[in-house]
Structure formats: structure tokens, C-alpha cells
Image (cartoon, helix red, strand yellow):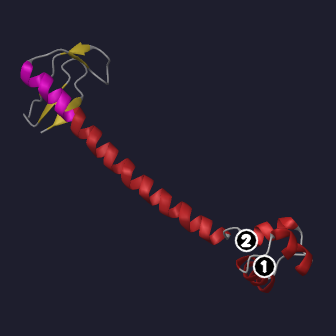
Amino acid sequence: MPLTPEKVEEVRKLYEEGKSTREIAKALRLSLRDIGIALGPSIDDQLRELAELQSETDKKAEYAVKMMKKLWASFFLTAYRKGEEVICPYCYQPIVPADSADGKGVICPKCGKTLVQL
């Protein structure tokens, strides 16, 4: 027999009064499992909490991606300015980053892919 909202309220009321789960089970003729379900957080509460956690995680992931892009740009711009050799993330060849034809970025001279846009 499913728990009715009235039974859930009764269980919570008795629990707040200090009754043990066994005492509540005897008084209301419910199983310990039903008592646990009634006292546990509702599905809506759990879903709401998960949605909040997902939102926080998404914000942190966006920030991490943004910072990685900045680090990526900084790394290749430093290599470009100093003329240092780095590994291209697209062709995996050692390269010295070069100016793009339009002067608006830094490219890999071997594969031609844009590493950083200025």
C-alpha cells in the first residue's frame, strides 16, 4: 500500500516528537522501509539539489575552459615571440609558430591551422 501524504505527515510528526522508527512503525502499522521513505528527502528535493549542483558544475567547467584557452594562447604567443619550438596540437610536429597571412593570428607553418587569433 503506497504512502499517502497524510501518513507521511504523521510519520514526520511522530519522528519530530522523538519517537524511534520502530515505535512509529508499530503505532502506524507501517514497515521500516516505508518509514525510511517518509523520512527521507522527496524526489523533488533531490532533483532540485541535483539541478543546482549541475548548474554550479557547468559554471566551473565554463570558467575552466575559458582559463585553458587563455593559457593556450599565452603559451603559443610566448613561443611565437621568442621563436621557440613547440609541438603543434593538430599535426604533432615540432614547429616555430608563424604569423598568419592576414596578420591576425599565429599559425602552424606545417599544417596551416590557426593556433591563436590576435
> Quadrant location of residue 78?
top left
Q: Secondary structure at mark 1?
A: helix
Where is residue 58 drawn, in percent x and y? 42, 54
Q: Which mark is residue 100?
A: none
- Is residue 61 rendered to the left or right of residue 83? right
Q: Which segment is the magenta one? A: 73-82
Q: Vertically, is 32 above or below 116? A: below
Q: Vertically, is 90 above or below 39? A: above
> Quadrant location of residue 21?
bottom right
Q: At label 1, which amino acid type do we have? A: Val
Where is residue 110 drawn, in percent x and y? 22, 17
**Residue at screen point 77% across, 68% down:** 37
- Is residue 27 rendered to the left or right of residue 69? right
- Compare residues 28 and 8 and report the one nearer the observer: 28
Kindly report the distance in space between the C-alpha atoms of the residues bearing marks 1 and 2: 7 Å
Q: Vertically, is 68 above or below 37? A: above
Magenta residues: mostly which secondary structure? helix
Q: Which mark is residue 39?
A: 2
Residue under label 1: 11
